[in-house]
Image (cartoon, helix red, strand yellow):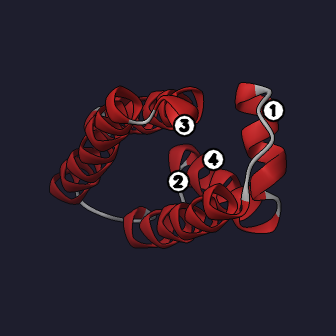
Amino acid sequence: MNPLEVARAAYGITELAAPAGVEFVLTRVRADGRTRAVARILGGRHVLQALLLANASSGAHRLGAFVDATHALSMVGLALVDRSRRRTALASAAVALGFAVAEFRQ
């Protein structure tokens, strides 16, 4: 497994295990129940994506980059329409964009 996928898996496992903690570290905002549930779903997605891309081709990594970029774009959209979740959405977008750039370079 390459270092990027190790980092992605670690991030995903942390989101699964302690979603409120991840949110608080990134945003200094206390996560509500809905945010924690969504964070756990996204954490599971990160773990699955890390496993699928562990020994994948460059084409698969580009597909992973597309998934991450799509997630980032959706979070920017959420930030624009839901002021109460803006900080959380933008933090999630930044993480997703970082993963997208890193995957594209694989």
Q: Which residue is mark 1?
A: 25
Q: Are marks 2 and 4 in contact (CB under 8 Å)?
A: yes
Across and down, in percent, residue 38 comes to: 56, 63
Q: Quadrant of the C terminus?
A: top left
Q: Secondary structure at mark 4?
A: helix
Q: Residue 5 got which mark?
A: 2
* Circles 2 and 1: CB atoms closer than 8 Å: no
Residue 13 image position (x, y, % from top left):
71, 64
> Which mark sits nearer the N-terminus, 1 or 3?
1
Tell me the residue at 52%/44% (across/down).
4
The answer to whether the residue labelled 1 contacts the one labelled 3, judged by CB atoms less than 8 Å apart, is: no
**Cα distance in 3D space between marks 1 and 3:** 15 Å
The N terminus, quarter of image: bottom right
Q: Residues within 10 Å of mark 2 (few under 14, many from 20)?
A: many
Chain-order first, disc 2 or disc 1: 2
Q: Considering the numbered disc 2 on the image, is that residue within a helix, a strand or a loop?
A: helix
Q: CA distance from mark 2 to mark 4?
A: 5 Å
Callout 2, which amino acid?
Glu
Disc marking residue 7: 4
| Residue count near mark 1 (Cα–Cα under 10 Å), binned few <14, some 14–19, many ≥20 | few
Instruction: Check disc 4 and give the amino acid type.
Output: Ala
Measure how far apart labels 3 and 4 are at the Cα level: 25 Å
Of circles 1 and 3, which is in front?
A: 3
Residue 85, disc: 3
Circle 4 or circle 1, nearest the eye: 1
| Three-letter residue code for mark 3 | Arg
Residue 95, x across and y down, in percent = 51, 34
Mark identifier at residue 63: none
Q: Position of residue 16 (x, y in %)?
A: 71, 67
Identify which amino acid the numbered label 1 is placed on: Val
Res 81 → quadrant:
top left
